[in-house]
Amino acid sequence: MTVEQVKRYNGSISILIGGAAGMGIATLESILNNAFKKSGFYVYSTKEFMSRVRGGSNTTLIRISDTPIEAPCWSVDISIALDALALKHMQGRCHKDTLIFADEAFGEGNAILVAMKESAKKFGNAKYANTYIAGMLFGVLSIDKSFLLQSIAEHFKGDEVNKEVAEFGYEVGVKLENKSKFKLPKVDIEGLKKFHQMDGTTASGFGFLAGGCNMLTAYPMSPSTGVLNFMAAMSKEFDIAVEQSEDEIASLHMVLGGWYAGARAMTTTSGGGFALMGEALSLSGMTETPAVIYLAQRPGPATGLPTRSEQGDLNLAVYSGHGPFPRVVLAPSCLKECINYGYLAFELADRFGIPAIFLSDQYLADSISMIEDVDFASYEQRRYIVKTQEGYERYADTKDGISPRGIPGFGDGLICSVGDEHDERGQITEDYNMRERMVAKRARKNNELIKEAIPPEVYGEGDIAIVGWGSTKGSISEALQNLNNPDLAQVHFAWVYPLSKEQLSVLGNFSHIIVVENNADGAFANQLRLHDIKIYNQILQSNGFNFFADQLTLMIEESIKEIL
């Protein structure tokens, strides 16, 4: 099987648009996504962009289908190049049947040449080229242009010229003699009205709001900055204190101060910023002060590939900080999980008095898909703060290790919190017996946390498990649909640390386990090995791209050859 042959297994149409930063690809993506949804299609889009404000070669992939889509594909049906560099950059993703469009000024080879910029200039400005392309694309696909015109009117309020340009482009697209005859997926305009389009950043933000976040302090770092911006925007509607701190060291310490005073606080960062937070993370562990950290992964080491994607920070999340202390690491895969686990991060942090690390990545943060209406009233915000009495002991040595947490001014008790080892009151101590008691107390708390571990989801009844975590779920799911092999099953982990025996017991049902990870070190497979799980094979990718479903189909097919 080849990547091109995989195409026949899925009923979607994939459109790749490429150009330089500053050419308006994001605007074109927004208009088309909205228009396709209005037309009754499920829509999925994702981005690839270079680390620069202007220039370079960026792409946006849009897929439309009659069923929900949660993964990108490498091989595309339609390729639209906005400049000469994009035409070359996207060449490797085209096959013999790909419909390639390029401007007549630079197009060559098998590309369909269209007067993109010259046609736009007739309407007064070359910037209208994107609107022209949107109209042409709808014409090529023979989709009712009224939905596109509605989308354009919503995006460019009061600008009638863009609608005129789109109509002109539509007529050009309809008349193209050498256009392919695509078999469009079925549409469900009424059924899709209950669906909403959003990216992983927005869904995560809604999850944090559902969890009661009322304070965020962070230093901007791609690709985590989107959540900082989202919460800043939401602060106009909700009581949220948002502060751009001077650096990541300060931001997590401010978060701890917020929780100490009774807030539900969080910070956002990526790998390099999280590396600076190790001291504050340990302070959270010693003082048993909650913290929520949104860690959006990108390739490292150091600056690495700052606008690309990777699942490279699992070890960083699990092992950062000096000395042992409980923590939880959650890695959602889709919009619904972003909301659910954003909420859960605050619940677990507050209840157990621990840092909760929410692992996203550039791919999940920036990809746009669809989600049904969400009942936010169902996310109950529980508070775990107690009103203190005289003689209150902040670090009471309880049976489960979870000490009742008070805050200053709420009750008559004295609240002591210190980064040194301490006794039950919170007073500094070097007594070795007390040290042993406090270490054991924190360990018992971790034992209670493990009991809450959410089991992995299992799809299929095959004997060979394709195991993934976090954002790989959609690509694995589609790859297994493409293969349609009853011997295969998918196992997806979103709760990735700490792992419990109950969680892992499901893996005992499989004869072979293959772990798929978007990294070079197989960090999650190594976590499984620590629990005596035998791994048959690993599929790793660390080129800055997320997994593409069609390519992953071939990787899995190759990986299981010797088993079947």
Image (cartoon, rainbow, N blue to C red):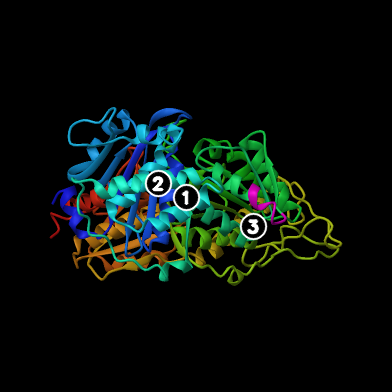
| Badge 3 element | loop
Residues marked 2 and 1 touching at CB (< 8 Å): yes
| Badge 1 element | helix
Which amino acid, by three-letter code, is at mark 1?
Ile
Crowding at dot 1, Cα within 10 Å, few <14 / some 14-19 / many 20+, comes out as: many
Residue that numbered label 2 is attached to: 166
1 relative position to 381: left or right = left
What distance separates the C-alpha of mark 3 from that of mark 1? 48 Å
Which circle, 3 or 1, is nearer the viewer?
Answer: 1
What distance separates the C-alpha of mark 2 from that of mark 1? 8 Å
Which amino acid, by three-letter code, is at mark 2?
Ala
| Badge 2 element | helix
Residue 551 position, x and y percent, is 24, 48
Crowding at dot 3, Cα within 10 Å, few <14 / some 14-19 / many 20+, comes out as: many
Which circle, 3 or 2, is nearer the viewer?
Answer: 2
269, 232: nearer the viewer: 232
Residue at image position (40%, 67%) is 189
Residue that numbered label 3 is attached to: 353
Magenta residue span: 232-239
Residue 39 lies in magenta, yes or no?
A: no
Residue 6 position, x and y percent, is 19, 54
378 relative position to 410: left or right = left
Residue 135 position, x and y percent, is 36, 47
| Vertical placement of residue 140 versus 125, above or below | below
Residue that numbered label 1 is attached to: 152
The mark total stands at: 3
Which amino acid, by three-letter code, is at mark 3?
Gly
Residue at image position (41%, 32%) is 121
Residue 234 lies in magenta, yes or no?
A: yes
455, 38: nearer the viewer: 38
